[in-house]
Image (spheres, coloured by chain):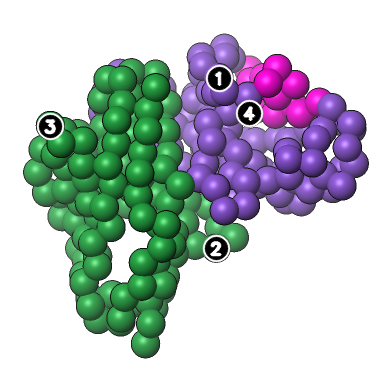
Chain colours: A green, B purple
């Protein structure tokens, strides 16, 4: 089976940097995804990691350590519009994505 | 390019009734996934269809079923509705799934089912 853990809530200030952690246990590993979901909207794809290391995409970066079963999403220069739920998801041997419960990020002015 | 479309947006049913939710994938996508998102919970995997076949299902009772049509659209049926079935049902589509690789799911806006 698969188990994915991430913090339930985080709060940060506009302009700051925040790191959202995700730990996972999975049968087989075929990649880790991060999605963003604003309230009442569909989740949208942010990043994908399959090899160890850091993937950078603008203000967002994602890191993966397969040996530790660990990933983080780093958000820089926070903006109010970044207030959303951030979902960590793993593709295991079953090939569909298994999602964590999500981290609700609140950005304060 | 049109995204993933779902209908209806909202649906209200009573306990014991049946609900049917529909999903049209992005043109060219052959895989369709259904997820349940109950209030305050994460996305729970329900069903995966590809090329008209059910490829995998999550840990849900048999009263959750579905199918995929030749045009790759899909419907989810929930029979004998229970109060705890109240949730947002999200459909996602993707290109045919390789065993590895960034096969990104694109989600629809969801159908909110309320069971009274």
Dot 2 corresponds to which residue? Answer: A39
- The residue lying at 49 percent from left, 25 percent from top is B31
Residue identifier under label 3: A67
The answer to whether one can see residue B65 in this image is: no
Q: Are marks 2 and 4 on the same chain?
A: no
Is label 3 in a helix, a strand or a loop? Answer: loop
Q: Position of residue B24 (x, y in %)?
A: 62, 36
Indicate the quadrant containing the N terminus of chain A: top left, top right, bottom left or bottom right: top left
Image position of A56 with respect to A76: above or below: above
**Camera-side residue: A39 or A26?**
A26
Disc 3 sits on a residue from what chain?
Answer: A
Q: Which residues are magenta?
A: B61-79
**Alpha carbon separation for disc pair 2 and 1:** 27 Å
Callouts 1 and 4 close, C-beta under 8 Å: no
Residue picked out by circle 4? B73
Identify the residue at horizontal 50%, vertical 45% (top origin). Answer: B42
């Amino acid at each position: 089976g698969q188990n994915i853990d991430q913090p339930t809530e985080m709060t940060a200030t506009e302009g700051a940097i925040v790191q959202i952690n995700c730990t996972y246990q999975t049968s087989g590993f075929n990649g880790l995804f991060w999605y963003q979901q604003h309230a009442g909207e569909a989740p949208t794809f942010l990043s994908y990691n399959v090899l160890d290391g850091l993937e950078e995409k603008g203000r967002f970066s994602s890191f993966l350590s397969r040996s530790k079963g660990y990933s983080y999403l780093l958000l820089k220069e926070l903006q109010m519009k970044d207030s959303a739920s951030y979902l960590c998801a793993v593709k295991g041997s079953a090939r569909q994505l298994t999602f964590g419960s999500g981290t609700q990020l609140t950005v304060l002015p | 390019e049109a995204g993933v479309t779902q209908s209806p947006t909202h649906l209200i049913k009573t306990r014991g009734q049946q609900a049917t939710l529909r999903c049209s994938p992005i043109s060219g996508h052959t895989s369709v996934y259904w997820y349940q998102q109950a209030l305050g919970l994460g996305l729970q995997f329900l069903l995966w269809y590809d090329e008209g076949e059910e490829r995998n299902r999550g840990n849900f009772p048999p009263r959750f079923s579905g199918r995929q049509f030749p045009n790759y659209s899909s419907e989810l049926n929930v029979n004998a509705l229970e109060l705890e079935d109240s949730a947002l049902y999200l459909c996602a589509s993707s290109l045919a799934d390789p065993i590895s690789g960034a096969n990104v799911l694109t989600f629809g806006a969801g159908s909110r089912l309320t069971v009274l």
